[in-house]
Image: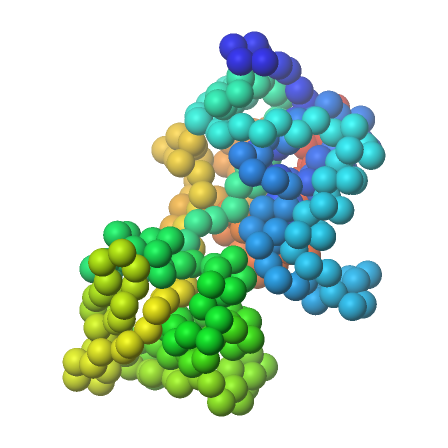
Amino acid sequence: MMGEKQFYDLVVLGGGPAGVTAALYAVRAGLSVVILEKMMLGGEIVSTDRLDNFPAFPEGVSGAEFGMFLQQQTANFNIPVQTAEIEKASLNSEIKRVSTSGGEYESKTVLIATGTEPNLLGAEGEKELLGRGVSYCATCDAAFFRDREVAVVGGGNAALEETVYLDRFASKIYLIHRRDQFRGVKSLQDKVLSLPGVEVLFNTTVSKIEGEDKVSGLRIKQDGADRFLDVDGVFIYAGRTANAPYLEKEVIDVGNNGFIVTNEKMETSLPGVYAAGDIRQKYLRQVITAAADGAIAATAAAQFVFA
């Protein structure tokens, strides 16, 4: 309840695949655990249309279904999940303290698994038209643009994956990338380039997102020349930044874009504090690697608690 302090062996910040896996492993190791999550379990995967590359789902599984399975599994293990906004985490002492919109938590160990948030493109009109044609999630908003023309900005895996998904809905997609070649994996590049409804614009940047109540077009610069695109929506994939505004970052080692530095046991620079999933500085950010991180972190946390 509000105002009460509750004590656990492990407090898990974030209820995505990393956090839930860690909680499951921790409970099985004999730790008392709580998950703090401001939304539903599953994290960003919940808004994904289909998860096809996770083992044991030969036909794939929707993101929403995957989130429901996580919810069922935590319930089966009697793991408490508190819906709350994390406001501050004080982690540089023996007893860790986490303040949330729903109460105070103290613990011997903490796992940071709150994922990432999208970077802004920085174009004029982006903030003003967010939710009115500007989106960072095609699987969330593609249905609003059925039979309409849209733009996707970016050249990495996320931009390519979301372009493929958008192609089911939009009548035409302009794929805008500031470089002269994509950065995503070859199979995704080939898939995107095979879609007749996609026009790729290399060496192109967005100058302005136009519109009053909603997006009405894009001002772009292609090979140095100005051009206008008549689109109703723009999906932006300009990279991501660690989502941890509650952290006192001066006391924990972070790398580029605030991603938390860990060793192979998911240990951060603070004793008893671990990081897992997309928020960790790592090579690959996928559901399966997030789950693996969580399992390792929980095992390390149990060794720390029972040492």
Residue in the picture at 66% in, 20% down: 8
Would you say residue 194 is visible in this rendering?
yes
Residue in the picture at 45% in, 43% down: 243
Residue in the picture at 55% in, 75% down: 168
Image quadrant holding the N terminus, namely top right
Q: Nearer the viewer, residue 220 or 289?
A: 220
Whether residue 142 is situated above or below residue 303 in the rendered picture: below
Whether residue 179 is situated above or below residue 62 in the rendered picture: below
Percent x, y of residue 148? 42, 74
Percent x, y of residue 123? 24, 61
Q: Is residue 176 left or right of residue 183?
A: left
Q: Is residue 135 left or right of residue 304?
A: left
Percent x, y of residue 262? 54, 44
Direction left: furthest residue: 225
Q: Nearer the viewer, residue 98 or 78?
A: 78
Question: Quarter of the image holding residue 41?
Answer: top right
Q: Nearer the viewer, residue 72 or 157?
A: 72
Residue in the picture at 58% in, 46% down: 43
Question: Quarter of the image holding residue 48?
Answer: bottom right
Whether residue 237 is situated above or below residue 74 in the rendered picture: below
Q: Nearer the viewer, residue 159 or 297?
A: 159
Question: Quarter of the image holding residue 79?
Answer: top right
Would you say residue 160 is visible in this rendering?
no
Percent x, y of residue 33? 70, 26
Image quadrant holding the C terminus, namely top right
Total number of numbered discs in the rendering = 0
Its colouring scheme is: rainbow
